[in-house]
Amino acid sequence: MEQTLRPAVRSRTAERVSDDVAVQPPTVLDLQDLAVYYGAFRAVRGVNMAVGQNEITAMIGPSGCGKSTVLRSLNRMNDLIRGARVEGKVVYHGIDLYDPRVDPVEVRRRIGMVFQKPNPFPKSIYDNITYGPKIAGAPKSSFDELVETSLRKAALWDEVKDRLKESALGLSGGQQQRLCIARAIATNPDVLLMDEPCSALDPIATGYIEDLMHEIKTEYTIVIVTHNMQQAARVSDRTAFFTAELDSNNDRRTGLLVEFDLTDKIFSNPSDERTENYVTGRFG
Amino acid sequence: MANARTMFDEELEALRLQVEVLTERVAEAVGRARRVVVDGDGEAARQLIDSDDAIDEMSVSLTETCYTLLAREAPVASDLRLVVSIIRVLHTLERIGDLALRVAHAVDDQPLIAGHADIYQVLVRLADNVADRFAAVREGWAGRSVEPLDRLDSFDPLAEFAEPLVTRVMALTGPDAVRVALAATAVGRSLDRIGDQTQIMACRLRYLVTGDVTYLADEVAW
């Protein structure tokens, strides 16, 4: 009987989902029917997804499903692999990244990459940060400020400000990874790609990196590949689930994008049974 | 050796079966409450009172199991919906048990209520209504199917019982008027709340099966 006495209540999640769909952020990277080949082998196919500005987009899926391959195609890192080629389009702010007129070095300046294993250069903390800007021709007079700003954004300044000239290799794993993020930030990119950035870190260092992602997403668009589904659920706004299926043409497994949606949806009520089976641990 | 996922599946299935057992016990309580209203069945009242502790203990124990599964397995998607939905209905089933208990406690006043045919008829119809509702919802939960819930629309709306009951209670006169009024109101209120709680179980089942979060909003409207 109380039903007639109460005001109508709506689901916040339902409202949020419908609002989110209505106010989808501007697209930074638009992947259109993307396929990546290594020689004759088609590593991944059928990728259609729009990476939204100032969002964290997670790519999840079993090993060999092509998520890292797709990530590397977003800043043309695959160009460095002999025989690698792309079909379809990766459109960045309206520009096809694979247009022959596009400079891949400029692409990588605007779309930075943080790798699975922290890989600081065997140089000082200071030199790690200034390495990219130095190559890009930034004035030396700007370096001090740049180092401080980048390290502050990477939540590392307070820990290293008194030893900037010491070797970066003396930092802990978590600090090294934040240094790599600071180094990527120093070139003033628009997008940060992160390929399993926490897989070599302990839970505390992982927590720092995840917090950092939340902090910096107001300034950057982030795409992260992760095997840790809890991490994808915690940090990302949208999630892309990839899987691998046998290619009847060559008896090899080809990755494909199964589902791309709001992370809340992927982890609470995915549309595709393959996604459901993966996120619940029944497959993969 | 079974893998972790298989073990988790087995734990979920065991949990689901135990909730089915608890639902069956609560169904018995609702049936006994109906017999108290219809026949003033003292034995049914005694059994209902005796069974309440077991319902409470089972509800608490299964809630603990759910919390453990949440902490240990961090379930997602349909697994998460199952565990959180069970937590919700465990509370609901425990409440239905308590409400049925209140009806049992009115057993001594049943002959007085039965002496007022107009009031008695409303309460019997309401008791039948909520017992049938609960049966439909229990069937749905047992099979994790929303189809049995279609029957809920065929029952008289719960809201239609309030006015005739209150009108007739207010018209009572005579030396036993206050006692009958209090007993009939308490029984009517308890039965009505059992109906509401049953509807909450129905909403939660729809959410569990479909994943549609709008059913969560429907749930709090009851």
Image (tube, coloured by chain):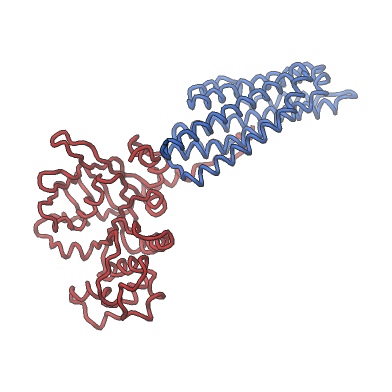
Q: Is residue B212 visible?
A: no
Residue B5 position (above or below residue B190): below
Relative image position of residue B167 (x, y in whole percent): 75, 25
Q: Nearer the viewer, residue B180 or B33?
A: B33
Relative image position of residue B197 (x, y in whole percent): 62, 32
For the point 53% across and 37% down, the residue is: B85
Q: Nearer the viewer, residue A22 or A30?
A: A30
Instruction: Name the side, left or right, on which A181 lies relative to B123.
Output: left
Relative image position of residue B55 (x, y in whole percent): 66, 32
- Residue with the most extreme front position: B1
Q: Quadrant of residue A164?
A: bottom left
For the point 56% across and 40% down, the residue is: B65
Residue B81 position (above or below residue A169): above
Q: Nearer the viewer, residue B212 or B49?
A: B49
Please tell me the colour of chain B: blue
Q: Quadrant of residue A220?
A: bottom left
Instruction: Name the side, left or right, on which A82 lies relative to B170.
Output: left
Chain letter, colour red: A
For the point 26% across and 49% down, the residue is: A67
